[in-house]
Image (spheres, rainbow, N blue to C red):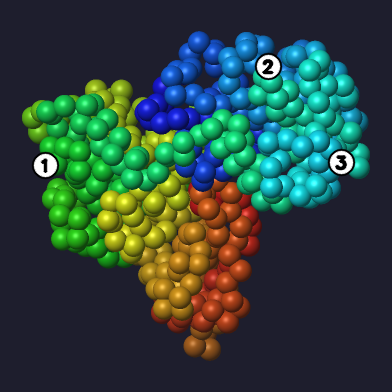
Amino acid sequence: MRKTDTVSWERVVIFDFGSQYTQLIARRIRENKVFAEIVPYNTPIEAIDRKHLIGIILSGGPATVLREDSPKIGKEVFALGLPVLGICYGMQLMAYLLGGRLTSSITREYGRARFRIKRSSSLFEGVPDSSIVWMSHGDSVETVPDGFVVTGETDTLPVASFEEPERLLFGLQFHPEVAHTEFGSRIIENFLVRICHAKQDYTPESFVERTVDRIREEVGDRKLIMAVSGGVDSTVAAVLIHKAIGERLVPLFVDNGLLREGEATDVLDTFRSTLSIPVKFIDASDRFLTNLSGICDPEEKRKVIGRTFIEVFEEVASSIPGVCCLGQGTLYPDLIESVSFRGPSATIKSHHNVGGLPERMKLKLVEPLRELFKDEVRAVGRSLGIPRAVLMRHPFPGPGLAVRIIGEVTKDRLDILRKVDNIFIQALKDDGLYDEVWQAFAVLLPVCSVGVMGDKRSYGNSVVLRAVVSQDGMTADWAHLPYDFLAMVSGKIINSVKEVNRVVYDISSKPPSTIEWE
């Protein structure tokens, strides 16, 4: 198990059994100013630093507890003297391990249910006797273990919650972490404050203070080299590192030729003038475009871009004496989507800044944001005094426009996409819609279509406009932009970019789609 970088905070450990909602549990805990750490379900108890541990949560999961090969933990987790909350699969597993009896259902119960409190509990303080909760389970608890009492039921489930108050063991068959559970946030708060007695000291200010101290300890009196893109993640990470080690930070801005219109100038001005951080500019656009020539597969594009970054960094780092570390703005969702970080998680796509780079470069990796979600990064940025215009920029992928061009990346196709993207983003800003969406961009398709322009037949490019609303990028819904706005943008693009004669709008959500097309 990788020890968390923030062990000095009180924290709750979440044993992950593969639930789609595990990240939501962590987010809800952090919203209560308590640090939450997710670990794979098979993490040995002795591998967990218990010095600042105040509680344990067993997540839900898709498996059936009664199967021999289902994920399980040892009973010793219940003998630590710490509060334990089992959610859905976690509740069933708790019952099973402690001597209760489960029953299997032929079909899963999925969706809203009316939950009724049968017995007063500190877990349900301030929760009405009857409320709506969100169910997602197949098995259920038929008989509770010795010493446990049933605290809640639904119309179809006689044991919807239970507890053993003396041992501080609690179980919920529903998901309190999802918005569909009416008083789920209150239940989680009760577990943290009334049962775990959390101090609630996990704040942006405390994160900055402790992270700066840790960076100073890691880097010492040597130098750290870091790529900055102007995006929220790398900017906040760079400001944190600069606060810790000052001029020993060597920030590099690499123009890979895959940037949006005017981006290089804007980023350099932000760092040099607004943030007072000197940035070294490197124009490597020709190298990136040459290496991408003829490549259409999206994963191969990402790998080529990652390798090219390595080449550029190796060359620059070797020319700077005293460099020991590489800084990156990696976030928690990057880790989750790139690698099987938490056990039963699937790799969705490669991120150019996750994995492989430190080994090649022989530099110690410093990732001050790797345990944070995007909204937490913005909160940290606000506490650092970073301007709102920088913090509220929409996310931009590390591979840049290369993954927004479906097919081969060429200079001509990049020029077309830059123009289209700039029109779309500027229109969102002009109409006051930019801050209403999480992310917006254009995609250039490898599809041409017939059109009529100026009374003549045209055969031009097709582009997709994409805008989504989200909290952290882990899930997202397509943004319901006004029809008249979309009509205006479509007309402006077709009239201004002669190579384009068709504009479409993406109305798919994540999941099942991803936000980016590649």
Q: Mark 1 highlights which residue?
A: 247
Q: Secondary structure at mark 3?
A: loop
Residue 269: quarter of image? bottom left
Whichever of callouts 1 and 3 sits on the residue coming sooner in the sequence is: 3
Between marks 2 and 3 in the image, the one whose residue lies nearer the viewer: 3
Q: Position of residue 362 (x, y in %)?
A: 24, 23
Tell which of 411 and 149 is nearer to you: 149
- The amino acid on which the numbered mark 2 sits, given as a three-letter code, is Lys
At x 48%, y 13%, the residue is 47
At 46% across and 62% down in the image, what residue appears? 441
Residue highlighted by disc 3: 154
Q: Is residue 254 left or right of residue 336?
A: left
**Circle 2 — which element?**
loop
The Cα–Cα distance between marks 2 and 1, rounded to whole angstroms, is 49 Å
Which sits in the foreground, 510 or 191?
Answer: 191
The amino acid beneath tag 3 is Thr
Q: In the displayed structure, does residue 179 sit left or right of residue 414?
A: right
Q: Which residue is mark 2?
A: 72
Task: State whether residue 379 is above or below residue 356.
Answer: below
The residue depicted at 41 percent of the width and 31 percent of the height is 9
116 above or below 9?
below
Residue 164 seen in render: yes
Query: Considering only order in the chain, which callout, 3 or 2, is on the residue closer to the N terminus?
Result: 2
Q: Position of residue 12 (x, y in %)?
A: 52, 29
In front: label 1 or label 3: 3
Which x, y percent locates residue 124?
71, 41
